[in-house]
């Protein structure tokens, strides 16, 4: 199996991306609908990590029509599609990786991500979560809807397969490649707590699509 760089993977699949997520990935359609319910009632700014084409923003904009969303994604084509979908909304696009990116201190009312974090190892996730925590104002939330598993053995197996594939592909850098290495729900909670969040909870799950909410005091 050939590992593809993340931006290349999604650029190639852009024409069918929305349909795939809505129709083929169990839980995604409902997850998009439920995400606004997990955000504070009064919100002016959101950080959206790995935003893709902005499927998660449709329901958010319907609930919070004047919110400003900072959208971060590796794939320029995805960002262009997102901006075309919401021409009258307040969107700040950032093309690039959110890994190791500093988003400032207490800038956003809340942050969100949808089906993106399961491509990273636990140590990378922890670093990302720390930056998310720092960027959110006190009283804000981080809402993550992602592919998660329940068994540690499966998490370990998938990570082992990823490491083996990188070796077979001759990959020695720390680039971002498309392969699913989800964490268990318990590990997700621990990582968010280690990053500083309080009262981390799983609020919904369908198939392996799982929604977590982490609160910043």
Image (cartoon, grey):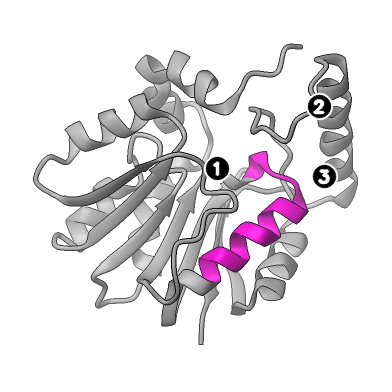
Residue interval drawn in magenta:
118-133
Q: Secondary structure at mark 3?
A: helix
- Position of the N terminus, as image quadrant, is top right
Q: Is residue 83 above or below residue 90?
A: above
Q: CA distance from mark 1 to mark 2?
A: 22 Å
Residue picked out by circle 1: 116
Q: Is residue 72 above or below residue 179?
A: below
Residue 154 found in image quarter: top right
Depth check, front residue: 66 or 202: 66
Q: Earlier in the sequence, mark 1 or mark 3?
A: 1
Depth check, front residue: 149 or 77: 77
Residue 11 found in image quarter: top left
Q: Secondary structure at mark 2?
A: loop
Residue picked out by circle 2: 172
Label placed on residue 86: none
Q: Earlier in the sequence, mark 3 or mark 2?
A: 3
Residue 93 visible in the picture: yes
Does residue 1 appear left or right of residue 80 in this picture?
Answer: right
Residue 23 found in image quarter: top left
Q: CA distance from mark 1 to mark 3?
A: 16 Å
Residue at x-position 60% and y-position 77%: 197
Q: Can you name the residue that lies furthest to the left here?
A: 88
Q: Secondary structure at mark 1?
A: loop
Residue at x-position 14% and y-position 62%: 66
Q: CA distance from mark 3 to mark 2?
A: 22 Å
Residue picked out by circle 3: 155
- What percent of the width, then of the height, locates residue 50? 47, 43
Residue 124 lies in the magenta-colored region: yes
Prevailing secondary structure class for the magenta stretch in the rendered image:
helix
């Amino acid at each position: 199996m050939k590992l593809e760089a993340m931006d290349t993977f999604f650029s190639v699949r852009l024409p069918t991306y929305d349909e795939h997520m809505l129709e083929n990935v169990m839980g995604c359609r409902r997850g998009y609908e439920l995400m606004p319910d997990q955000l504070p009632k009064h919100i002016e700014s959101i950080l959206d990590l790995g935003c893709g084409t902005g499927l998660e923003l449709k329901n958010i904009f319907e609930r919070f029509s004047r919110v400003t969303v900072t959208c971060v994604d590796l794939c320029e084509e995805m960002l262009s599609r997102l901006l075309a979908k919401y021409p009258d909304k307040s969107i700040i696009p950032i093309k690039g990786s959110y890994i190791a990116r500093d988003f400032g201190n207490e800038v956003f009312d809340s942050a969100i991500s949808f089906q993106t974090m399961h491509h990273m190892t636990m140590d990378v996730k922890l670093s990302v979560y720390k930056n998310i925590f720092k960027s959110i104002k006190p009283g804000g939330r981080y809402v993550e809807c992602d592919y998660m598993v329940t068994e540690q053995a499966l998490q370990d197996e998938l990570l082992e397969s990823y490491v083996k594939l990188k070796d077979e592909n001759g990959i020695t850098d720390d680039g971002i490649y498309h392969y699913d290495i989800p964490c268990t729900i318990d590990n997700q909670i621990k990582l968010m707590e280690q990053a500083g969040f309080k009262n981390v909870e799983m609020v919904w799950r369908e198939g392996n699509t799982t929604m977590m909410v982490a609160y910043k005091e």
